[in-house]
Image (cartoon, grey):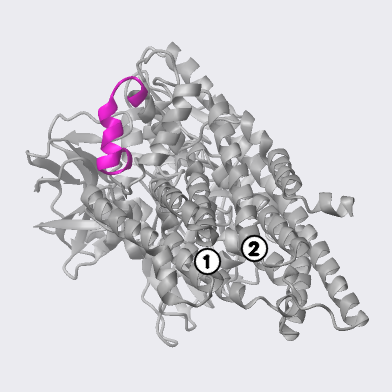
């Protein structure tokens, strides 16, 4: 009996949970800062240096005054400020806070389940609480929150959220002497949770449910309302003050980030793979498409589900929990209606942190609940059956916790490695920067290692070279081409890159993600006739090329067309055309232009067709590629017109890092029969208009032109003779007008899929042009609201409003 009492001792359970969490995630203590960490720690360092106005601003307005967010989170800032005062810029202290906070959250969850199962027998209550907390503690989806300093936002919020609920349960059951004190502490915890992250908004709803289901007596609406009234009043007061601080009740990500999330929200909710990854948290880069552990985990889930169905069949499930758990899950999912989604690498796992609480508690509570409301077994056989069911349930719960722990330790290691690479990258950058005498270009700033964040954008990179991460500020001589806020890590503004590269004495440094060091950039070579623009006609006399044989496609020249065209049938995944012996100078070629036509076969007219182009990287063909959605599939079996698809190769920085490009692979769309007539390799001047500012405003090191909010800005658009020869009158199209497109505040065209680009667009300016009229056209932009980034780009339209060629590289303007 003493041994049994020891095994059920809650202090032992709490100690075990703390030990298991520490052993699983302790390697986090040796990593470095990541992504947003740099900006937020630099911010609190200014407060610690005496700028208390910045601290006050977080209580009276938006968090850190970030323009792309509308959130009220002063307590999160207090958490980071406290760490900075103690630890400075030493990452060890911040991750120690993360780990200890996470341990306390797991212990809090244990206490919460124990409190709500206190009417069960001691054995079942303690085991249900222990396994619920254990499965939650070892969930692999929590690596992002633990091993990223600002990922603590969910952990700290969850601590106060669970503390609020635990104190509410205690106040509900306490005498009048302690009730008031516990209620006040519960309300304070609710405020601290909401001031950390808005995910805690479900706490008042759960408090009402707890009062109704576990109240004495239960289902007493009037008494339940009295118990919950302080929390409900606090919620109303919170939203009133929030509105005064932010000017909105909802908030969240805004501007370009918010638009991109809203555009993809419905797709994520309807995507079954997103929900599947919630239960099978395997990062693709680590485990591949079909890991063996997934099969084992599926078998464990099957066993747990079978045990649940046995309990369901015997009508011995806890009715209160059958109501409460779905409600708990719903309140955890509602605040992330725009953020729901888990990528192939489990990106965004932190957003489901709260949802993993009820999910972790489901099987332990359902399988270990007393039978028939705690009634004793009526026969020996029934008693043996219950013990066997409980024993199998415990075994299955141990199995799922063990698998979670194994996966979590491996995934967390990816975050640790990401931090270590960022530390090495930062040290090398500081060393090189101190030796530079003039500006240099930096490419390949590491963004991700699997699902782990690294350096967020060009702005984040600049902070690496400033205090508090270095003792004294040094002159930053690096020119970067990363996204201003967020975006594709491989994307580059090719026009700006070539302009910077042409400056005398310019050097280029490229980060090698494999060797974890900087590699040499191939020096520009003298042009050869084969290195520039040219067209390859696909016919029987075509240069060396062949069809990729991964699928079942067949490739032959068409004899009934003039000129002859290559016709490809039965295209499946991986099929395309290989072009070798090209010897392309990447500085001379920007586009691969493909002419093709869908000859036969009905397609889903609601979807676009994708064409891709990839190039050789050492021994890896197709490792780097660009793609484009270009064609609405024809209705029924009607064939489409021949279309010209413009694939911007130079928008990927890796296009420049291999020296001469020897081969290209054009991946074809999955259609039944397609004709391809030619592949053209063209510079941007032959495909797009060129846009620039007419003023002498200097571009910043991260690619932003400062403008004044109270002054107009003029841009000039140039159309070269090459443009009309390749895409205009010489190609049978007549240019009618130039269109200038201006983005919304902090919205970036390249972050939106082509069918969603209109969501980033704020204004259009148009000017008529005469066909084949080369020269310069000037536009005066409207006044741009202060304090945000805007993109401006140009396109040429024909008389029907269709784009001729492709859109220009954008200018990024910062209104000040």
State left or right for residue 373 relative to residue 46: right
Give the quadrant of the C terminus: top left
Quarter of the rendering containing residue 112: bottom right
Residue at the spot x=52%, y=67% of the render? Answer: 210
Q: Is residue 489 placed above or below 93 in the rendered structure? A: below
Residue 414 rendering spot, x and y as whole percentages: 64, 41
Circle 2 residues within 10 Å: few <14, some 14–19, many ≥20 = many
Q: Mark 2 vs mark 1: which is more N-terminal? A: 1
The span from disc 2 to disc 1 (Cα, nearest Å) is: 10 Å
The label on residue 472 is none
Residue 371 rendering spot, x and y as whole percentages: 75, 77
Q: What kind of element bears circle 1?
A: helix
515 or 3, which lies in front? 3
Residue at the spot x=62%, y=39% of the render? Answer: 618
Instruction: Point out the stretch of residues depicted in magenta.
Output: 47-65
Does the magenta stretch mainly form a helix, a strand or a loop? helix
Residue 387 rendering spot, x and y as whole percentages: 86, 71
Residue indicated by mark 2: 361
Q: Residue furthest right?
A: 380
**Could you tell me if residue 500 is visible in this image?**
yes
**Could you tell me if residue 595 is visible in this image?**
no
Q: Are marks 2 and 1 in contact (CB under 8 Å)?
A: yes
Q: Is residue 656 placed above or below 88 in the rendered structure? A: below
Circle 1 residues within 10 Å: few <14, some 14–19, many ≥20 = many
Residue indicated by mark 1: 328
Residue 655 rendering spot, x and y as whole percentages: 47, 41
**Any magenta on residue 57?**
yes
**Any magenta on residue 199?**
no
State left or right for residue 567 relative to residue 8: left
Q: Is residue 121 placed above or below 308 in the rendered structure? A: above
């Amino acid at each position: 009996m003493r041994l049994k009492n020891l095994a059920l001792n809650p202090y032992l359970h709490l100690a075990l949970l703390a030990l298991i969490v520490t052993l699983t995630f302790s390697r986090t203590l040796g990593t470095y800062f990541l992504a947003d960490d740099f900006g937020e720690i630099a911010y609190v360092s200014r407060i610690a240096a005496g700028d208390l106005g910045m601290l006050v601003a977080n209580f009276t307005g938006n968090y850190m005054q970030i323009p792309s967010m509308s959130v009220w989170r002063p307590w999160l800032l207090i958490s980071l400020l406290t760490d900075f005062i103690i630890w400075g810029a030493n990452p060890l202290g911040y991750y120690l806070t993360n780990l200890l906070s996470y341990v306390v959250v797991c212990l809090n969850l244990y206490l919460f389940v124990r409190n709500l199962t206190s009417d069960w027998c001691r054995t079942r209550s303690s085991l249900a609480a222990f396994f619920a907390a254990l499965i939650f503690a070892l969930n692999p989806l929590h690596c992002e929150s633990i091993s990223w300093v600002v990922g603590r936002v969910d952990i700290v919020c969850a601590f106060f959220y669970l503390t609020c609920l635990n104190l509410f349960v205690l106040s509900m059951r306490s005498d009048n002497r302690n009730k008031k004190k516990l209620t006040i502490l519960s309300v304070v915890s609710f405020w601290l949770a909401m001031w950390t992250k808005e995910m805690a908004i479900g706490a008042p709803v759960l408090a009402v449910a707890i009062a109704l289901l576990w109240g004495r007596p239960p289902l007493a609406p009037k008494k339940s309302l009295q118990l919950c009234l302080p929390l409900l009043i606090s919620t109303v007061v919170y939203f009133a003050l929030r509105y005064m601080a932010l000017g909105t009740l909802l908030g969240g990500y805004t501007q370009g980030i918010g638009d991109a999330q809203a555009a993809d929200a419905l797709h994520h909710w309807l995507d079954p793979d997103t929900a599947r990854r919630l239960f099978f948290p395997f990062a693709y880069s680590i485990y591949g498409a079909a890991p063996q552990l997934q099969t084992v985990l599926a078998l464990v889930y099957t066993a747990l589900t079978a045990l649940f169905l046995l309990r369901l069949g015997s009508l011995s499930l806890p009715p209160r929990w059958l109501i409460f758990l779905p409600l708990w899950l719903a309140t955890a999912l509602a605040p992330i209606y725009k953020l729901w989604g888990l990528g192939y690498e489990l990106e965004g796992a932190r957003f489901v942190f709260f949802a993993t609480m009820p999910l972790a508690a489901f099987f332990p509570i359902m399988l270990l609940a007393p039978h028939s409301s705690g009634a004793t077994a009526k026969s020996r056989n029934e008693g043996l059956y219950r013990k066997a069911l409980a024993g199998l349930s415990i075994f299955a719960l141990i199995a799922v916790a063990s698998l979670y722990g194994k996966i979590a330790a491996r995934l967390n290691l990816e975050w640790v490695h990401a931090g270590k690479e960022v530390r090495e990258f930062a040290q090398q950058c500081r060393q090189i920067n101190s030796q530079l005498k003039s500006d240099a270009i930096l490419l390949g700033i590491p963004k991700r290692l699997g699902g782990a964040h690294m350096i967020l954008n060009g702005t984040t990179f600049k902070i690496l070279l400033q205090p508090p991460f270095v003792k004294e500020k040094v002159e930053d001589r690096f020119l970067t081409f990363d996204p201003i806020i967020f975006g594709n890590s491989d994307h580059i503004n090719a026009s700006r890159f070539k302009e910077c590269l042409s400056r005398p004495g310019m050097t280029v440094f490229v980060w090698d993600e494999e060797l974890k060091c900087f590699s040499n950039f191939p020096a520009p070579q003298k042009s050869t006739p084969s290195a520039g623009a040219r067209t390859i006609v696909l016919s029987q006399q075509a240069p060396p090329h062949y069809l990729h044989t991964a699928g079942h496609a067949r490739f032959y020249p068409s004899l009934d067309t003039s000129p002859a065209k290559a016709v490809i049938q039965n295209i499946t995944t991986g099929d395309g055309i290989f072009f070798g012996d090209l010897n392309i100078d990447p500085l001379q070629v920007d586009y691969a232009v493909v002419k093709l036509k869908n000859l036969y076969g009905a397609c889903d007219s609601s979807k676009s067709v994708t064409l891709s182009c990839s190039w050789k990287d050492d021994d890896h063909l197709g490792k780097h590629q660009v793609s484009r959605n270009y064609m609405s599939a024809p209705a029924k079996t009607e064939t489409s017109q021949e279309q010209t698809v413009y694939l911007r190769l130079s928008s990927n920085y890796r296009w420049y890092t291999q020296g001469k490009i020897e081969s290209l692979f054009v991946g074809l769309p999955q259609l039944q029969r397609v004709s391809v007539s030619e592949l053209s390799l063209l510079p941007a001047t032959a495909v797009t208009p060129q846009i620039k500012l007419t003023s002498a405003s200097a571009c910043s090191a991260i690619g932003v032109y400062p403008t004044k909010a109270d002054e107009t800005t003029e841009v000039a658009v140039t159309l070269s003779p090459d443009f009309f020869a390749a895409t205009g009158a010489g190609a049978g199209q007549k240019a009618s007008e130039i269109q200038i497109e201006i983005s919304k505040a902090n919205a970036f065209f390249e972050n939106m899929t082509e069918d969603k680009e209109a969501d980033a667009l704020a204004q259009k300016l148009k000017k008529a042009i005469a066909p084949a009229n080369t020269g310069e056209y000037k536009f005066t932009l409207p006044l741009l609201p202060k304090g945000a980034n805007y993109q401006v780009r140009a396109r040429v339209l024909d008389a029907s409003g269709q784009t001729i060629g492709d859109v220009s590289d954008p200018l990024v303007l910062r209104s000040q």
